[in-house]
Amino acid sequence: MSNVKQTEILLESGTNELEIMEFTIAGELFGINVAKVREIMKISSVKTMQHTHPAIEGIYKPRDEVITVVDLAKYLGLPASENNERDIFIIANFNQMNFAFHVHSVVGIDRISWTQIEKPDPIIYGGEEGVATGIAQFMDRLITILDFEKIIAEISPRTGIQLSDLEKLGPRQRVEKPIVIVEDSMLLSRMITESLHRAGYENTIKLNNGKEAWEYLCEAKAVGDPIENHVACIVSDIEMPQMDGHRLTKLVKEDSVLKGIPIILFSSLINEEMRIKGKEIGADDQITKPEIVNLVSIIDRLTGLQPQG
């Protein structure tokens, strides 16, 4: 149907803004970060697959690539489209994989600030592992931003963080250096924390978004002792309500006291364009989820540590 061109926002650095593509399912309004969207296409015939998750509609091959199709209405427990001939496939790319999400219509694209996005009420949106990663208020509309990584991880668990992969690192020793984890997903935050603990990094500080992390860093700086006593390395997601990881990185690297703290952007969004943006604002390294073993190795390198058994 159309390619989604990477607009000016991807060339900017640390603006704390994003573009959301709005779409509907059964008349309800949802959103996806445009940075995840490769293109949108009219619905196509799909080859069904046996013994798959109920939300997997099947596979199709638009060109030279076989792509899995996820029926979002079925996943969310919403009614199917009354006239599916007008339905849309949103082709998304994250965690270095492509997926087609079957939706009922695409409304348009809005540019908003992360400060306009609130974390959803866990009681309403399924607890800490709920399907909504944020609620955006734009003009007179409330847009539910879905957690597409969680959806895929639930449908295909092997695409998520695998704690067993840490065995590849071999014996590890305890490390007391404080590692700050900035991640809005409680599920992912818990898994990253557990992974680092298994790798020997037992002194972790969990913060829910860039705004909380910046406040923590400012308070640590105000104490007056070496900043290394409070944070030896920051592991940050990019997509977060209130303040994203790019804005956090920009603030840290422009601060005379904090700029020496290594920052690793650990995000499903990491691709060629995002690497350019992350490099511009001073990120020390960037890695896509769920490469947890590589994340630990990068922390080892940036903190000057090579643990021995």
Image (tube, grey):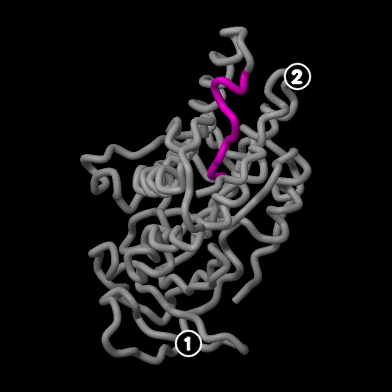
Q: Between 180 and 108, which is closer to the camera in this rendering?
A: 180
> Is residue 58 inside the magenta stretch?
no
Magenta span of residues: 227-238
Does residue 17 sit above or below 298 in this rendering? Answer: above
Amino acid marked by disc 2: Ser
Q: Going from the N terminus, do you reach mark 2 or mark 1 first?
A: 1
Q: Position of residue 65 (x, y in %)?
A: 58, 85
Q: Position of residue 30 (x, y in %)?
A: 41, 54
User: Which residue is outermost to the front?
Assistant: 309
Q: Which residue is mark 2?
A: 256
Q: Residue at x 72, y 57 (%)?
A: 273
Q: Which residue is mark 1?
A: 60
Secondary-structure class at tag 2: loop
Does residue 66 sit above or below 183 in this rendering? Answer: below
Q: Does the image show residue 207?
A: no
Amino acid marked by disc 1: Tyr
Q: Between 2 and 74, which is closer to the camera in this rendering?
A: 74
Q: Position of residue 140 (x, y in %)?
A: 43, 38
Real-space Cα separation, disc 2 to disc 1, in angstroms? 52 Å
Q: Which of the image's four quarters has the N terminus? A: bottom right
Is 206 positioned to the left or the right of 260 in the image? left
Instruction: Count residues near mark 1 (Cα–Cα under 10 Å), then give few for <14, some for 14-19, many for 20+.
Output: some
> Is residue 230 inside the magenta stretch?
yes
Q: Residue at x 44, y 61 (%)?
A: 167
Secondary-structure class at tag 1: strand
Q: Position of residue 97 (x, y in %)?
A: 54, 71
Tell us which disc is closer to us: 2 or 1.
Answer: 2
